[in-house]
C-alpha cells in the first residue's frame, strides 16, 4: 500500500511539473526554422534558414538585402515567429533571445511582441557583442499600452551598420516568453485523477 501511494504521489508531482513547464513558450531552433519569417522594412528581406551552429539556430542571410553605401551602410532586418497558441504573459512578462553577430556588423536590437492590441517594441539595446552569443531580454512589467493577455508572435529587429554589399549573416536562438503557469486541460485532468487516487488510498488505509 505504501509503495503504491508513493508511486501515485510521484506521478502526480511529475504531471504538475509538466503542466508548469508549459509556462515557457517559444522557439529553440533545434532542427528547423520553426516557421519564422522575415519582413522588408526598407532594405529588402533577409533569407532565413536553419543551421546546426550552436546546436541549432535560425540564420538570417543579409545578402538578399539592399544596404546603401551612403549614409554609412545603415540597414535593418526584421524577423518574427508565430506561437502555436495565443499566450498570456501578464503574470511573468519577460521575452528573451540569444543573438550572434559577426565582426562585420555593428548593430543593435529591439525585441517585439504581437499582442491583443497589435505589435509593441521594447527599447533598443546597446551595440551587440561581436563573434559571441549573448542573451538580450525585455521585461515588459509595468509597460503601458500593451495588452499581454494574448501574445501571438515574437519578433526581433536588428538595426545598424551592415557590410556593403550585405554579404553577412547573423543568428538567433532560444526565443522564449515566460507565460502564466496555467496547466493545459489534459494535464489538469490527469493531475486531478492522480490526486483522487491519493486521497482514495488514504481513506482506505484509515478505514482499514
Image (spheres, rainbow, N blue to C red):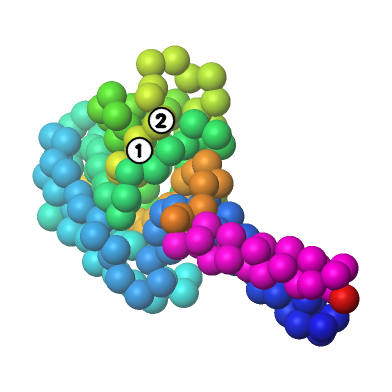
Horizontal side, residue 108 vs residue 182: left or right: left
Q: Is 73 covered by the magenta stretch?
A: no
**Quadrant housing the N terminus:** bottom right
Residue 55 in the image: state x and y as whole percent: 46, 74
Q: Residue at x 56, y 37 (%)?
A: 92
At 21% from the left and 29% from the top, the residue drawn is 71
Left or right placement of residue 65 versus residue 87 in this view: left
How many residues crowd mark 1 within 10 Å: few (<14), some (14–19), many (20+)? Answer: many
Q: How many discs mark residues in the rendered view? A: 2
Q: Which residue is more in the foreground, 36 or 201? A: 201
Instruction: Let me know if residue 160 appears in the view.
Output: no
Q: What residue does disc 1 label?
A: 151
Quarter holding residue 36: bottom left
Q: Is mark 1 on a helix, strand or loop?
A: strand
On screen, residue 125 above or below 36: above
Question: As rendered, which of 67 and 81 lies closer to the eye?
Answer: 81
Q: In this view, does 1 lie above or below 119?
A: below
Nearer to the camera, 38 or 6: 6
Residue 46 in the image: above or below residue 147 = below
Range covered by the magenta-colored residues: 186-207
The residue that appears at 36% across and 48% down in the rendered structure is: 105
Mark 1 and mark 2 in contact? Answer it, CB < 8 Å: yes
Q: Which residue appears at 20% of the width and 49% of the height?
A: 38
Q: How far apart are marks 1 and 2 (CA)?
A: 6 Å
**Residue 51: percent from the left, percent from the top?**
33, 72
Q: Which label is found at residue 148?
A: 2
Inspect the magenta stretch and tell me whether residue 190 lies in it: yes
Amino acid at each position: 500500500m505504501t509503495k503504491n501511494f508513493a508511486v501515485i504521489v510521484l506521478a502526480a508531482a511529475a504531471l504538475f511539473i509538466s503542466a508548469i513547464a508549459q509556462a515557457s513558450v517559444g522557439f529553440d531552433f533545434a532542427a528547423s526554422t520553426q516557421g519564422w519569417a522575415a519582413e522588408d522594412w526598407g532594405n529588402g528581406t533577409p533569407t532565413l534558414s536553419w543551421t546546426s551552429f550552436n546546436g541549432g539556430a535560425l540564420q538570417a542571410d543579409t545578402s538578399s538585402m539592399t544596404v546603401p553605401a551612403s549614409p554609412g551602410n545603415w540597414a535593418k532586418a526584421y524577423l518574427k515567429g508565430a506561437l502555436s497558441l495565443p499566450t498570456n504573459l501578464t503574470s511573468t512578462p519577460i521575452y528573451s533571445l540569444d543573438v550572434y553577430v559577426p565582426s562585420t556588423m555593428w548593430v543593435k536590437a529591439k525585441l517585439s511582441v504581437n499582442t491583443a492590441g497589435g505589435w509593441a517594441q521594447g527599447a533598443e539595446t546597446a551595440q551587440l557583442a561581436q563573434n559571441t552569443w549573448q542573451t538580450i531580454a525585455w521585461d515588459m512589467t509595468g509597460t503601458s499600452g500593451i495588452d499581454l493577455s494574448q501574445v501571438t508572435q515574437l519578433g526581433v529587429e536588428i538595426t545598424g551598420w551592415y557590410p556593403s554589399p550585405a554579404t553577412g549573416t547573423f543568428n538567433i536562438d532560444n526565443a522564449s516568453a515566460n507565460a502564466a503557469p496555467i496547466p493545459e486541460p489534459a494535464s489538469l485532468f490527469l493531475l486531478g485523477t492522480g490526486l483522487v487516487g491519493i486521497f482514495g488510498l488514504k481513506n482506505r488505509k484509515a478505514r482499514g
